Amino acid sequence: MDVDLVRLRYLAAVADHLHFGRAAAALHVARPTVSRALLELEAELGVELFVRPSERTELTPAGVELLEQARLRIAQDDLAQAAPRSDDDAPEPFTIGIMPGVTVSKWTRLWADRKPDAPLKVVRTDVENQVSALHAGIVDVSFVRLPIAQAGLSTIALYAELPVVVVPKDHPATLLDMVTVADLVDEHLLQDPNTVPEWRDAAATGRTVERRPLPAMRTMADAVALVAAGIGVVIVPQSVARMNHRKDVTYLPVVDVAESHVALAWLADRTTPEIEEFIGIVRGRSAQSSRATPTPARDAGARSAEPAAGRSRASGGGGGAKRPAPSARKPAKAAPKSRRGRR
């Protein structure tokens, strides 16, 4: 493992634990080793990765951006433990697409343990290409955020995430424990309203100010920086908010926006043995049984008769607050009412 990858692993551990001491313990190294390595990395890159001074451990926007790259590098490195091959003998890698906020390191590690001679590649997808990458043959399987165009696909629903609104730390809504879209209709939503249909529909009848054009944004980190500047708000899955968190923003649950459902998708007519193996890993099957039973094509909303324990294991690889797929949960209690924040 090269030294840069060691530092990236240190960065990811600190981001996961939000504490240098706990990260060092998880890495089985001394805390000063982690601190020194990350200070050297900051000096090398010429940026600050952590907010200073701060009462708690937080990433800067530059740290968040590097963390995304680090997670991809780490996932790929976890799978690069096979013996070196010549270019002529090297097999095509099994390629996984992942949406922002979805963490797959648990499953890629299991793949490396079970198939050390089978290389695996992880690529980042977005709303525009999470499905088209499958049809184009760019990825073999894709961790997608529903809903998607499911024609020709097989899917397995994995877990659901709470939607949250990211607001500045001094926003009136921070007086509440949770909000509704009615509380947010006059906010400048820094995303396509069609991505949050509940807000779009409520704003169509309840908005009292004219909607402004969206400012230039390339990444979610850019959008969160605009939130911090008081330009607007974003409504995203909790794992995405957490991944892009910074000290001058916070996030609150939006109780009447549909949860974000994460599923594993692949082409129904290309269910290869490798895809079956990966499905078995995600569903928590043992190495002896992961390919015992072919996985039929089905809609993401359909549930199989698998034991609940298998489903709960499958939900353990992503980020953010997760819940099992809808039918695996008890009926939710009515959410407490939120009151309209003062503008």
Image: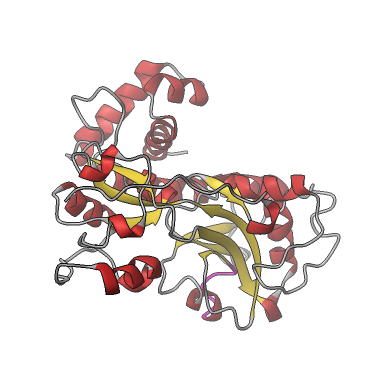
Instruction: Indicate the position of residue 273 as horizontal and vertical percent values.
Output: 75, 67
Q: How many marks?
A: 0
On screen, 206 above or below 247?
below
Residue 98 or 226: which is nearer the viewer?
Answer: 226
Q: Does the magenta stretch mainly form a helix, a strand or a loop?
A: loop
**Is 41 covered by the magenta stretch?**
no
In this view of the protein, which residue sits in the foreground, 52 or 136?
Answer: 52
Q: Percent position (x, y) of residue 63?
A: 28, 41
Q: Quadrant of residue 12?
A: top left
Please provide percent x and percent y for residue 218.
24, 63
- Whether residue 251 can be seen here: yes
- The answer to which of 229 and 62 lies nearer the viewer is 229
The colour style of the image is secondary structure
Residue at 20% over, 62% down: 188
Q: Is residue 117 above or below residue 275?
A: above
In the shown orientation, is residue 98 left or right of residue 84? left
- Say which residue appears at 44% left-offset and 33% top-offset: 13
Q: Is residue 134 left or right of residue 113?
A: left
| Up/down of 57 relative to 30, above or below | below
Q: Is residue 1 above or below residue 295?
A: above
Residue found at x 59% / y 62%: 263
- Residues drawn in magenta: 136-141
- Which x, y percent locates residue 52? 19, 27
> Could one spot residue 81 in this view of the protein?
no
Image position of 2 (left or right of 153):
left
Picture quadrant of residue 326: bottom right
Q: Residue at x 44, y 58 (%)?
A: 256
Find the residue positioned furthest to the bottom. 151
